[in-house]
Image (cartoon, rainbow, N blue to C red):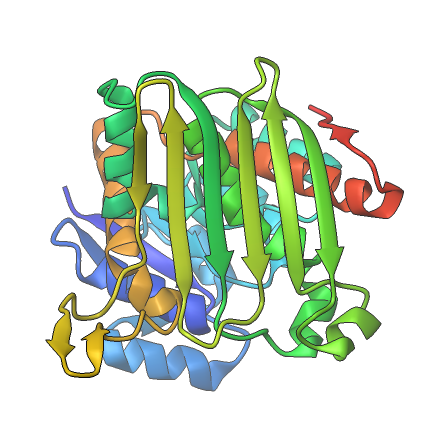
Amino acid sequence: MTVRFALLGAGRIGKVHAKAVSGNPDAVLVAVADAMPAAAEALAKEYGCDVRTIEAIEKAGDIDAVVICTPTDTHADLIERFARAGKAIFCEKPVDLNVNRVRECLKVVEETKGKLMVGFNRRFDPHFMAVRKAIDDGAIGTVEMVTITSRDPGAPPVDYIKRSGGIFRDMTIHDFDMARFLLGEEPVAVTAHASVLVDPDIGKAGDFDSVSVILETASGRQAVISNSRRTTYGYDQRIEVHGSKGMVAAENQRAVSIEIANGQGYTRPPLHDFFMTRYTEAYANEIASFIAAIEKGAVITPDGKDGLAALALADAAVRSVAEKRQVRVEG
C-alpha cells in the first residue's frame, strides 16, 4: 500500500515534512496547499505534486492522509475537518494553545474514529530511542532522575514570539514530551523559573528566553529541563537518565563525528546548526511510524492525548513562574 499525502503549509517545517514523505518508499506526496501561492507552487515544483486548495484536498479521493504544518491557531479546526473527512492526520505540535480547545478537538477525533499523530519528532531520534531501549532493557535499573538540555542557536523573530504561546508552549513542550517518554510515570507537579537574558524585546513581548523546570512524579521521580534561546556553539540537545543501577546518556550530535588531536589540543567539528539537520532521521522515522500505523491499523503514538499532556505541563509551568511556587498538574 502506498499512502497518498497532502501537505497543508509550505513553510519551514512543511518543507521538512515534504522531504520526509517524499523520501519514504511507501508514500507519495500528491498535493500541497498554502495561503501563500508562491510557497505552494515552489514546493509543488520541487516534489512534482499538485497545488490544491484545502477544500479540494478535503474532498479528494486520491488523498489518504494530511500533514498539518499551518499556523498553530488553525490546527484544531483542520484536525476536526479532516477527521470528519476520513483522512488520517499528522499534525505539528501543539494541537492548540488552549487545553479546553484541545479536549474539544480530541472529542471529535474520537467520535469520528479518526487517526491522529502529533509531531513530537524527538521520540523518533535514533539516539533518544536507544536511551529508551536501554531503560526498557533494564540496563540502568529503575529510572530516578532525567536531565534534558535543549538550547537553540538563536531566538525566533519577536513577531513569532508574540503568537507562539510563549517559550513553555512553543519550545519546552518538546522537552515535556521527552520527559514523559523517559520517566515512565506521569509528572504531577511542576516548578519553573524563567528569565529574559538573551533579548530584552522578548521580555517586552511578554515572554522569556531562559528557563529551568523541575517535574516530579507521584513516586518522586524527577526531570530537570534547561532551555535557552541562545547558544554560541550550535544546537545543544542532550539527555541523561539516572537509574538505580546506572546511567544512560545521549550526547550532542555533529554533522561529522571526528576528533583531531595536535599541538593545539583536541578539537571536534561544530554541532548541528538547528533542528532541520539535527533531527533529519527523527522526522523520517516519525513519518515512517505514521505510515506503518495507517497500513497496519495499529495504535498511533504519540497521539492527541500526548499533545494534551505536554500542553498541560506547559500551562503548569506558566502558572509556576507567575505564582512563584510549585504547581500541581491539571489533568
- Residue 129 percent coordinates (x, y): 27, 38
| Location of residue 191 (image quadrant) | top right
Q: Residue furthest top?
A: 219
- Would you say residue 73 is visible in this rendering? no
Question: How many numbered marks appear?
Answer: 0
- Residue 30 percent coordinates (x, y): 28, 62
Q: Is residue 270 above or below residue 304?
A: below
Name the residue nearer the viewer: 100 or 306.
306
Quarter of the picture holding the N terminus: top left
| Location of residue 249 (image quadrant) | top left
Identify the residue at horizontal 69%, vertical 49% (top origin).
97
Name the residue nearer the viewer: 14 or 141.
141
Name the residue nearer the viewer: 42 or 214.
214
| Location of residue 257 (image quadrant) | bottom left
Name the residue nearer the viewer: 22 or 149.
149
Image-based side of 274 in relation to 221, left or right: left
- Residue 313 percent coordinates (x, y): 65, 36
Q: Residue furthest front?
A: 263
- Residue 125 percent coordinates (x, y): 29, 48
Q: Is residue 184 above or below residue 46?
A: above
- Would you say residue 178 is visible in this rendering? yes
Identify the residue at horizontal 79%, vertical 70% (top origin).
203
Image-based side of 286 in relation to 105, left or right: left
Quarter of the picture holding the C terminus: top right
Identify the residue at horizontal 42%, vertical 32% (top origin).
181
Q: Is residue 141 above or below residue 107?
A: above
Identify the residue at horizontal 65%, vertical 61% (top origin).
210
Image-based side of 56 in relation to 123, left or right: right
